[in-house]
Image: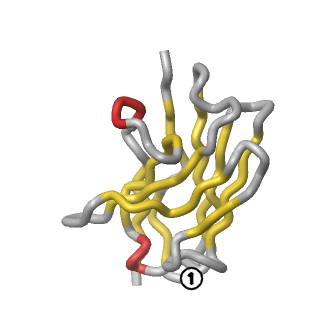
Amino acid sequence: QVQLVESGGGLVQAGGSLRLSCAASGTIFRLNTMAWYRQAPGNGRELVAYITSGGRTNYGDSVKGRFTISRDNAENTVHLQMTSLKPEDTAVYYCNKYPPIDKYWGKGTLVTVSS
């Protein structure tokens, strides 16, 4: 059974930092490109960043230079280090494969950035 569990969200002031983690079980992680997505209130889900099994990364324009995605293949985890946070980064953050598989969406972790 595949399970993705996100953690690390919280309330932070603008300019602050947070580190999100996603623990993956099952076979979803190994050899797959993993990604972070987010969904702000009233908006659709958008891609934040992805990382290939070999470590190549790609970022959405709105987070380039501020967020860093990484993975630990031994621990089946993927992280998102977020710095210089802005109020517009407020959203529920999810991890999934890239491209995503609908049945793999977890509950996400809420990030709230206050101004």
Crowdedness near tag 1: few (<14), some (14–19) or many (≥20) residues, C-alpha within 10 Å:
some
Where residue 19 appears, as percent x and y from the top left, is 62, 58
Query: Is 67 situated left or right of 4 in this image?
Result: right
Give above or below for 115 relative to 74: below
Which amino acid does the dot numbered 1 rest on?
Answer: Gly
Q: Which residue is drawn at 72% across and 46% down?
A: 71
Q: In which quarter of the image is residue 32?
A: top right
How is the structure coloured here?
secondary structure
Residue 106 shows in the view: no
Q: Which residue is drawn at 68% across and 48% down?
A: 52
As drawn, 78 above or below 43: above
The x, y position of residue 28, in whole percent, is 57, 28
Instruction: Return the x and y of residue 31 as percentages of the image width and height.
Output: 70, 33
Pick the residue in front: 30 or 93: 30
Q: Which residue is drawn at 49% across and 79% down?
A: 62
Q: Is residue 31 above or below residue 63?
A: above
Q: Name the residue under label 1.
A: 15
Image quadrant of residue 115? bottom left
- Horizontal and vertical percent position of residue 9: 49, 54
Question: Image point 59% across, 68% down: which residue?
Answer: 59
Q: Say what secondary structure mark 1 lies in.
A: loop
The residue lying furthest to the top in this view is 1
Asked if residue 19 is positioned above or below residue 13 in the image, the reply reads above
Is 45 situated left or right of 20 in this image?
left
* Horizontal relation, residue 96 to residue 115: left or right: right
Total marks in image: 1
Is 97 left or right of 106, judged from the image as shown? right
Work out whether residue 32 can be spotted. yes
Q: Which of 4 and 60 is in front in this view?
A: 60
